[in-house]
Every structure is written in structure tokens, then in C-alpha cells.
Amino acid sequence: MKKSTASGSKHKSLAGLDPQSGVSAKGLPLSANRSPSDDLRPWFGRLVAARIEADADHKIVCGMCNDLAYQRIVRRGRWTALSKDGDAAYQEEPILFGPHSKYMPLTCTGSVIAIGVGLRPGALTKLTQHQTPDLVDRIIRGDPLGLVESNIGEEYPSTGTPEDWNLRMEERLRELIRKLDPEPPDAVSVAFEHAAFLDPNIAPGDVAEEQGISLRQLERIVKRDFGMSPKKVLRRARALDLAAQLCGVADEEEEQELLLRYFDQSHLIREFQAFFANTPAAFRSTPHPLMTINLETRQARRLETLKRIAPGAKRPWEAQ
């Protein structure tokens, strides 16, 4: 395998993997992810580009659990996923992931180049013909956001950098917004997303009261834009924050706060198993390279949204 000159390769990582787009302090691969430019931010939550060099027959067995719908470009690697519709294989193509209600098993054989954009809750129906509840735990082939104009290899060349790919995505997304001139997502969904980041133990009724609407109205809006009930969204947020801490991609200063969100140890284990089909101890003991990328992307977005870190600033979990 070719030796990397990227900064990520200076640090110990998992055997057989050579991260090219970042590495955590625990040696797990990270992506180059950032917030979109201001003109795109109402609809899009994150731009993500990950590159990991590996031998052609090296297989990563992992998974993901997203709180957003993601349009992704599988640029390199032979991927499989077990979605709500069953097993399927993906290679050199754009695909649309719905948000997840639980961990989705995923594998990749060979080197990884995966490029994608997360749609903020409510944006999917503004920009595509898809309804979010219909896409939960599903993957659809195709390119509803128009990320690829004509030739995937020329527009996202493997010789490019992650930031090159993110800039190319922004160009295509900007063209889509100019064409559609869509309304931004519902302000209630924006507020609920922020509440899930800040305090996922909040009662949905309290969010409804803050927004001046009934609980039933909140439930209808959240179901439409997040794909599931408010309570399920908040439970998932707690589980994702805990999983990020277990993978070493959370702010260590929040560790006690994250644990105190659960009534006791049995409640913590039961809730974590509901989303990850594993105990926290077992999850911590097994490396999750793809899931770590997924979780780190969300944690960076969360901490930036809460203004705990500045966009572009060094993140607490990054390797020195």
C-alpha cells in the first residue's frame, strides 16, 4: 500500500487503514467535514469527505446511525449495507440515505472515498420528491440533489483533496437552490434540532410551549421533518452523544453530563442497546472506523451549533 504524506498518517491507526482525511486521538479515521457556506446553511447541515487508503481486499465491517438524511457519492470502495429493504451493494455511484432509527450494518472493501452532504430536517421535502418518514432506515439509488452533473470521475477525481470535493458539492448545491428557490425548513424543526443538541432530556411539550404551538402540532411537524416522533428523536440524540463519547469523538468535559442523562446504569444500557444492538461496554471495546466518522461529523456540527467550538477550530478529540 502506498505510503501517505497526509497528516493523518503520522499517527497510529487501525491495522490496514491509512487515514487521509484526519485521525482522532484514539487513532480512528476522521473525515474532512464542515458547515456549508452561509447561503446554503438553511437547507444543509454538513459537508463531508472521507478518504482512507487500504489494500484492495481489506474489509471494514462497521455501520452508521445518522440523525440527518444524507446524499452521498460512493467514489471508491465496494460497499454493502443492510437497510430496511435488505442487503444491497454499492460502488461508484450517488445514493440517498434516509435518517436512521437504529444502527445500520455497513461494510466497505478496499480504499474508501465517500463524499456527502447532510440535509437539515425539513429540507428533503423542499428539495426533492421524497418524504422523510418514507426514507427512515432506507437507501435509494440516484442523485436527487444533482451532485453529479455528468461524470462522477471527472467531477470528483480520486486525485483531488477532500476540500476539493466539498467545494464541488457546494457548487452543485448552489445551482440547485438557485433553480428551486425553496423556502427554508420550518422554524419549529430548526428549534427542535437545536433542543436535541442542547438537552435531549427536554420534554417535547416544553419545546411546543416555547414555540407557541400545541404538542400535537409539534408531533406532526417533527414526524414530517425528522421521520419519527419527538420522543424517538430525543432518545436517538442521547444515544448518539453517548456513542460519540465511547468512540472518543466527544468533548471529554461533557462526559459526566452525558451519563447523567440516564436514570441509572440499567436505563443507559437498555436505551443504548435499543439503538446499537450492543451494550456500551461491548461497543467501546470494538473499533468502529466508519461509525466514528459518522459520529464525529455530528459532534462537530452539534458543538458548532451550540457555539462551544468555532467553525474551523481544532476539535477536542483530534490528534495532536
Image (cartoon, rainbow, N blue to C red):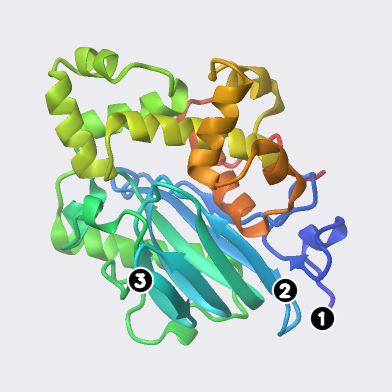
Q: Is residue 70 above or below residue 155?
A: above
Which residue is at 52% across, 74% downward?
80
Verify CB contact (< 8 Å) between mark 3 and mark 2: no
Tell me how far mark 1 sits from mark 2, CA to CA.
Answer: 8 Å
Query: Is residue 314 among the parts visible in the rendering?
Result: no
Disc 3 designates what residue? 147
Q: What is the secondary structure assignment of the residue under circle 1?
A: loop
How many labels sit on residues?
3
Inspect the image, locate mark 2, and give the three-letter code of the amino acid beneath it: Glu
Q: Tell which of 217 and 50 is nearer to you.
A: 217
Disc 2 designates what residue? 53
Verify CB contact (< 8 Å) between mark 1 and mark 2: yes
Q: Position of residue 60 (x, y in %)?
A: 67, 68
Q: Quadrant where the C terminus lies?
A: top right
**Which quadrant would residue 221 be assigned to in this image?**
top left
Inspect the image, locate mark 3, and give the three-letter code of the amino acid beneath it: Leu
**Which quadrant would residue 56 be assigned to in this image?**
bottom right
Disc on the earlier residue, 1 or 2: 1
Give left or right: position of 224 versus 317.
left
Disc 1 designates what residue? 2
Which residue is at 54% across, 32% downward?
270
Q: Determine crowd level at label 2: few under 14, some 14-19, many 20+ residues with C-alpha closer than 10 A.
A: many
Which residue is at 86% across, 59% downward?
10
Q: Is residue 240 above or below residue 172?
A: above
Tell me how far mark 1 sits from mark 3, CA to CA.
Answer: 29 Å
- Viewer-nearest of discs 3 and 2: 2
Q: Position of residue 82 (x, y in %)?
A: 46, 67
